[in-house]
Amino acid sequence: MTTWIGDTFTSDVGWSHLEKLVDVGDRMAGTQGESEALAATRDALASVGARDARVDTFPIQGWVRGDSDVVVGDRTLRTIALPRSPSGSVTGPLVDLDDGLPEAFDRDLSGSVVLVSSTVPDHVDRFIHRREKYYRAVEAGAAGFVFRNHVPGQLPPTGSVGTSEAPIGEIPAVGVSKEVGAQLARRDVGEEVTLRVACETPDTESGTVHADVGPDTDEAVYLTSHVDAHDIAEGALDNGAGTAMVVEVARVLAERADELDTRVHLACFGSEEVGLVGSAHHAADADDVRAVCNLDGVCAGRTLKTHVGDFDGLGDAFERVAERYDHPVTVVPEHLPHSDHWPYVARGLPGCMVSAETGERGRGWGHTEADTLDKLEVRTFREQAVLLADVVVELADADADLEPLPRDRIATALEEQGEAAGMRLTGDWPF
């Protein structure tokens, strides 16, 4: 009964796929690299025994990086454009909004270039997403947006702007390192700053990998991840590790198929980093979803963390597995509307996002050029594969508590979490 555990602790299947993904190079949504990574993931799932492995494609708004910079007087500072920023050059007085809390935008910012941090202080109850800060700046009349990293190391952060209705953002946006941001805040507040972004926005194509393991039931438990990554880095943590974990867990589940009461559907989405495009495309018509277990940021630390919202049955499954292995798992009873489980949860379907405890707020190395394979440990990967395989078996049990919730209950929970106002601003409020 436990042979599979030993096999998992010595398996190289998932980790080898992770190495293949990071070696692809640029996996930005809509690129040849993303297409290559999708095909490799399809083949990896087929090789571990998943059936009907395929890539389903869909059209997307592409975005191709050009040059960008911030110029103050005779200084040209290192930047990177935020994906789906429009091309353009703007000049205006620099306004430092510090952590970019909502109240900081309650002013006339017409014509200004705003500077905001990538984090929020510990006393703030919720993490304020980059896109919320961007659209608060747009709403207040800003001409440009500078997103400064809060992590030292000369690493400018990336992360997309834009909405589902208007995929290209309204004002030029760039990321700068903590050090460049500190210099701007110290020396240049009130000075004229020029922000320049060059990019191309072709129509292109993305896709999602689909496959199945277990019995051929009408409903399925979904095990998901995203394949795409930002073009500036290997995307090892975000989210090569999640997709590699889907492959490793699929290998385990194929061997344990007789323990599954419900089909497990494996879905590795494209275009997550540009607004959950892949998962939203699929979720709109999916009629077989019993629950979604989405992997995004696993392996960042040894302790798994899962946001389960009001879906108690999901949390119970993780807690049973944690007790079984005497291994900590952090279960957070809040909805997290920023990854590929969300388009399903927005319909009232049970869904959770699984990441890992790091002891810090924010993405750490994620969304920077330092998101590389050397930051991850194969030991952690294998430990988490054991835990996650058992979680999925628990969720696939016929008696698992996986009832949908009324959408108004989810909306109320998001209101109570303080997420609703920001989601309305960014066009992400589906209720």
Image: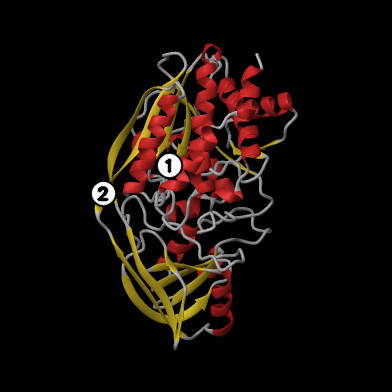
Mark 1 closeness class: few <14, some 14–19, many ≥20 residues within 10 Å: many
Amino acid of disc 1: Val
Looking at the picture, the colour scheme in use is: secondary structure
Q: Nearer the viewer, residue 341 or 12?
A: 12
Amino acid of disc 2: Thr
Does 418 appear above or below 95?
A: above
Task: Examine the rendering and report whether any part of residue 142 can be seen.
Answer: no
Answer with left or right where residue 89 lies relative to residue 268: left
Q: Nearer the viewer, residue 399 or 51?
A: 51
Answer with left or right where residue 161 lies relative to residue 297: left
Task: Examine the rendering and report whether any part of residue 155 can be seen.
Answer: yes
Image location of residue 211, percent across then percent down: 40, 26
Q: Nearer the viewer, residue 359 or 100?
A: 359
Q: Secondary structure at mark 1?
A: loop
Does 15 appear above or below 104?
A: above
Q: Residue at x 34, y 50 (%)?
A: 164
Q: Residue at x 53, y 21 (%)?
A: 253
Q: Residue furthest top?
A: 258
Q: Which residue is mark 1?
A: 227
Mark 2 closeness class: few <14, some 14–19, many ≥20 residues within 10 Å: some
Q: Residue at x 53, y 19 (%)?
A: 396
Q: Which mark is residue 398?
A: none
Mark 2 in CB contact with mark 1 (< 8 angstroms): no
Does 159 appear above or below 259?
A: below
Image location of residue 181, percent across then percent down: 55, 73
The answer to which image quadrant residue 192 occupies is bottom left
Q: Secondary structure at mark 2?
A: strand
Q: Separation of disc 2 and disc 1 at Cα?
A: 16 Å
Q: Residue furthest bottom?
A: 74
Q: Which residue is mark 2?
A: 204
Image location of residue 13, percent across then percent down: 52, 31
Quarter of the picture containing the N terminus is: top right
